[in-house]
């Protein structure tokens, strides 16, 4: 049997590592990288926000239109698709991970590949494709942190670089997800770290996230740009959960499992066609996304931005102004946003979290018109259930994000949200064989070809 002071492989135990001078240096480095990473993340998010406002609102006004024409999103998202296609074709790397796979933590992006990640994600987000900023932030944060660590110590060990890269991811993502703890849950579940080493591995990241949160607050005071937060104020008060609400939690979990799986399935079906002709297919995908937004705006009196973008900034007004939405409008929103989301997952680069949350909230609002389902409960169950499916699992993160998002009623929501999340998670898992992507048709050197780079061999 192994000694309690050492592992079976002879490597140091967590307590031995924690007491070492090298680990103290690693903590200091983690805190240090939190500052530049948080600054980059802050201005990345601000650039996305200003670009979205410019291309959707300011540009048509500057061109002489009285307002944003209904058809305007169609060329805009197509231009974004073209820029994404150019990034994937000509810049190093794959532009980030495949968002249709959910939130999957992969290897740290290299400095060489970071421009491709930034370019593809900015083109995706700025022009209105239905994805979020969280996945690119994780990659940019980890890549920047590792770059800084290598500049400080060129011969840094590989394990130290992994921990520093995780610290950079924490610092970049945590303030976007309201709390450093939310970032910790997300990355912990995504990476699948386990055992007694968890706290030792995560501590530099938590420290970096805490420093990053302070940097975000300081930059807000200096620039006046505002904070990036998901918390929704002034939501309807919710009482103690009822038996009927638990029944609704099961029903919403089942529905979210089916809808989320269908969204991912459609994305996987489209991907082989996109990967073969990226420069042509991504603009066409942009036309489809823009067309869905224009269709929604033409049929309703709501703007195309409800379908475009990740839905992060549109979520609070959707809930606070729920009385201005009819059931038909909400159902049309869910349909158009889901289709646009699926096409975006198949072709663009970004994160899968926020569009799923928005669709879940809209679906919950529509169902709240039925008996026995309060508005806030419907929103909470829908958000949690869709989040766990679109993240590809991660139930703890889905519950935590939902409760932080609706934190004013978190105590009354926690039990029904957990039920909805677990039901959706199990339902999606049962449907996973159906939702799996097609196996690649071609291989290179005995390994499946990367679909995001396949077009480089088929110009």
Image: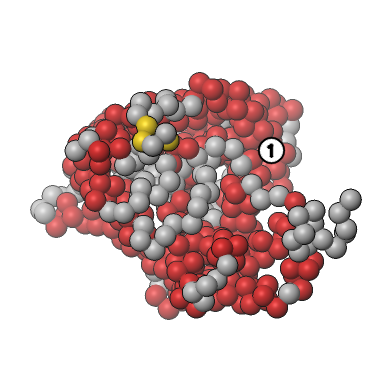
Q: From the image, which quarter does the C terminus lie in? A: top left
Q: Give the quarter of the image for residue 164.
A: bottom right
On the image, numbered disc 1 is attached to which residue?
418
Give the image location of residue 125, x and y in percent: 34, 50
Closer to the camera, 68 or 36?
36
Residue under the image location 38 percent in, 67 percent down: 43
Tell me where residue 240 appears, x and y as whole percent: 74, 39
User: Could you say where residue 302 lies in the image, as x and y percent from the top left?
Assistant: 32, 39
Snapshot quadrant of residue 238: top right
- Does 162 sit above or below residue 273? below
Asked which quadrant contains residue 130, the reply is top left
Q: Residue furthest front?
A: 445
32 with respect to 73 (left or right)? right
Task: Give me the residue at 70% from left, 78% from top.
Answer: 21
Residue at position x 35%, y 48% from top? 94
* 281 up-or-down from 187: above or below: above
SS at mark 1 in the image: helix
Q: Is residue 456 above or below residue 146?
A: above
Residue 122 visible at all: no
Residue 103 in sight from this viewpoint:
yes
- Its colouring scheme is secondary structure
Residue farthest toward the left in the current orientation of the protein: 64
What is the x, y in percent for residue 62?
14, 57
Viewer-closest of 152 and 28: 152
Between 66 and 348, the residue placed more toward the observer is 348
Residue 113 falls left or right of residue 410: left
At a point 43% along the width and 35% down the height, the residue shown is: 447
Is 160 or 416 nearer to us in this picture? 160
């Amino acid at each position: 049997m192994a000694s309690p002071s050492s592992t079976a492989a002879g490597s140091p135990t967590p307590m031995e590592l924690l007491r070492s001078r090298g680990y103290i240096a690693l903590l200091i480095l983690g805190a240090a990288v939190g500052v530049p990473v948080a600054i980059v993340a802050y201005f990345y998010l601000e650039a996305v926000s200003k670009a979205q406002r410019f291309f959707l609102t300011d540009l048509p006004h500057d061109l002489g239109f009285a307002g944003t024409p209904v058809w305007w999103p169609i060329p805009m998202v197509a231009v974004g698709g073209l820029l994404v296609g150019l990034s994937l074709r000509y810049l190093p790397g794959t532009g980030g991970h495949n968002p249709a796979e959910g939130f999957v933590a992969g290897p740290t992006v290299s400095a060489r590949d970071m421009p491709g990640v930034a370019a593809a994600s900015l083109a995706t987000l700025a022009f209105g494709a239905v994805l979020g900023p969280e996945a690119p932030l994780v990659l940019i944060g980890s890549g920047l942190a590792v770059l800084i660590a290598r500049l400080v110590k060129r011969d840094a060990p590989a394990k130290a670089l992994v921990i520093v890269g995780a610290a950079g991811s924490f610092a970049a993502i945590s303030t976007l997800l309201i709390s450093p703890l939310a970032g910790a849950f997300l990355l912990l579940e995504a990476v699948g770290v386990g055992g007694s080493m968890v706290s030792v591995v995560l501590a530099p990241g938590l420290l970096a996230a805490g420093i990053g949160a302070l940097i975000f607050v300081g930059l807000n005071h200096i620039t006046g740009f505002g904070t990036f937060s998901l918390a929704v104020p002034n939501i309807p008060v919710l009482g103690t959960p009822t038996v009927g609400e638990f029944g609704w939690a099961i029903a919403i979990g089942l529905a979210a499992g089916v809808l989320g799986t269908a969204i991912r399935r459609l994305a996987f079906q489209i991907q082989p066609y996109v990967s073969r002709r990226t420069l042509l297919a991504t603009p066409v995908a942009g036309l489809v996304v823009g067309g869905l937004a224009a269709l929604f705006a033409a049929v309703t009196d709501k703007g195309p931005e409800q379908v475009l973008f990740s839905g992060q900034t549109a979520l609070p007004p959707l809930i606070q102004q729920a009385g201005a939405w009819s059931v038909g409008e909400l159902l049309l929103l869910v349909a158009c946003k889901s289709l646009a989301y699926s096409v975006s997952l198949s072709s663009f680069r970004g994160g899968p979290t926020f569009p799923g949350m928005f669709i879940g909230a809209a679906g919950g609002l529509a169902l709240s018109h039925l008996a026995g389902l309060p508005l806030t409960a419907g929103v909470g169950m829908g958000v949690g259930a869709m989040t766990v499916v679109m993240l590809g699992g991660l139930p703890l993160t889905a519950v935590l994000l939902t409760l932080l998002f609706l934190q004013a009623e978190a105590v009354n929501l926690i039990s029904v949200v957990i039920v909805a999340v677990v039901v959706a998670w199990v339902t999606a898992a049962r449907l996973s064989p159906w939702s799996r992507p097609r196996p690649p048709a071609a291989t290179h050197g005995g390994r499946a070809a990367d679909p995001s780079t396949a077009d480089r061999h088929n110009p």
